[in-house]
């Protein structure tokens, strides 16, 4: 399982129920990287997508404890055990904060877009630079969009860390 996320310099990912920032080039990268693979997400992250609709071209596995919640074109799971039993190994964990926190321990790779700025944020991704179980292995070139600088870092898990 792999995680994919966009973070600011403090590993902030969202604020007020929405992502800290959307960068068109990063959205394209996200789409290309996840296309054809199952995606795992929380109910609140689904609500941030256009029309609250699941992502096309990908099997959407959504976590929600609400038995009435059944968006068209997605599978809803009421708990992690049921989700993990159904999730293929090539699935991407795509957020939000509660789902990253719950499933990072199951991931072996994290594709992180690092934005070189800080934004107001009320939820975060775990800081992989401070976690010895993870190592930054591949760094992409610096990029800039709309005056915002960012680059991509691929982290690999070196060993299983119960705290991750
Ligand atoms: N920067 C990025 O790359 C990125 C990516 C994704 C999301 N985000 C941001 O992250 C924020 C959302 O994160 P969040 O943590 O508030 O919400 P979330 O993880 O997207 O969704 C939380 C919801 O998922 C369900 N859920 C979570 N764990 C569950 C479990 N173990 N069993 C059953 N259901 C479970 C619950 O739904 P019910 O309430 O329906 O029971 C819960 O309220 C937003 O600001 C979003 O924009 C950022």
Image (spheres, grey):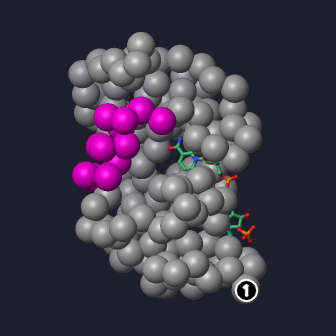
Image quarter where ligand 1 lies:
bottom right
| Quarter occupied by residue 89 | bottom left
Task: Choose between 70 and 3: the one closer to the eye.
Answer: 70
The vertical placement of 3 against 5, above or below, is below
Measuring from the top left, give residue 160's x and y in whole percent.
Answer: 47, 55
Point out the image quarter for the N terminus: bottom left
Residue 48 part of the magenta segment = no
Q: Which residue shows up at 62% across the image and 60% down it?
A: 47
Measuring from the top left, give residue 120's x and y in whole percent.
Answer: 69, 26
The answer to whether residue 10 is left or right of residue 57 is right
Q: Which residue shows up at 27% across the image and 52% down it?
A: 33
- Residue 82 visible from this viewpoint: yes
Q: Residue furthest top?
A: 147
| Residue holding disc 1 | 67
Residue 30 part of the magenta segment = yes
Is the C-beta of the residue carrying label 1 under 8 Å from the nearest atom of ligand 1?
no
Assign a secondary structure to mark 1: loop
The answer to whether residue 138 is left or right of residue 126 is left
Task: Choose between 87 and 128: the one closer to the eye.
Answer: 87
Q: Which residue shows up at 36% across the image and 67% down it?
A: 56
Number of marks in picture: 1
The vertical placement of 126 against 101, above or below, is above
Q: Main secondary structure of the magenta part?
A: helix
| Quarter occupied by residue 58 | bottom left
Q: Which residue shows up at 40% across the image and 19% down it?
A: 146
Dot 1: within a 10 Å radius of its alpha carbon, few (fewer than 14), some, or many (20 or more) residues? few
- Residue 155 visible from this viewpoint: no
Magenta-highlighted residues: 22-33
């Amino acid at each position: 399982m792999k995680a994919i996320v966009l973070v600011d310099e403090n590993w902030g990912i969202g604020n007020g129920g929405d992502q800290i920032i959307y960068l068109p080039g990063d959205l394209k990268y996200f789409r290309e990287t996840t296309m054809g693979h199952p995606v795992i997400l929380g109910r609140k992250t689904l609500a941030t997508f256009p029309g609250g609709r699941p992502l096309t071209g990908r099997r959407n596995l959504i976590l929600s404890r609400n038995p009435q919640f059944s968006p068209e074109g997605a599978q809803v799971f009421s708990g992690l055990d049921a989700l993990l039993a159904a999730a293929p190994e090539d699935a991407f964990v795509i957020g939000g904060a509660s789902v990253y926190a719950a499933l990072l321990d199951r991931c072996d790779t994290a594709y992180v877009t690092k934005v070189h700025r800080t934004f107001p944020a009320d939820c975060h991704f775990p800081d992989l630079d401070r976690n010895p179980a993870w190592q930054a292995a591949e760094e992409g070139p610096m990029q800039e969009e709309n005056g915002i600088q960012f680059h991509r870092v691929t982290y690999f898990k070196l060993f299983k860390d119960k705290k991750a």
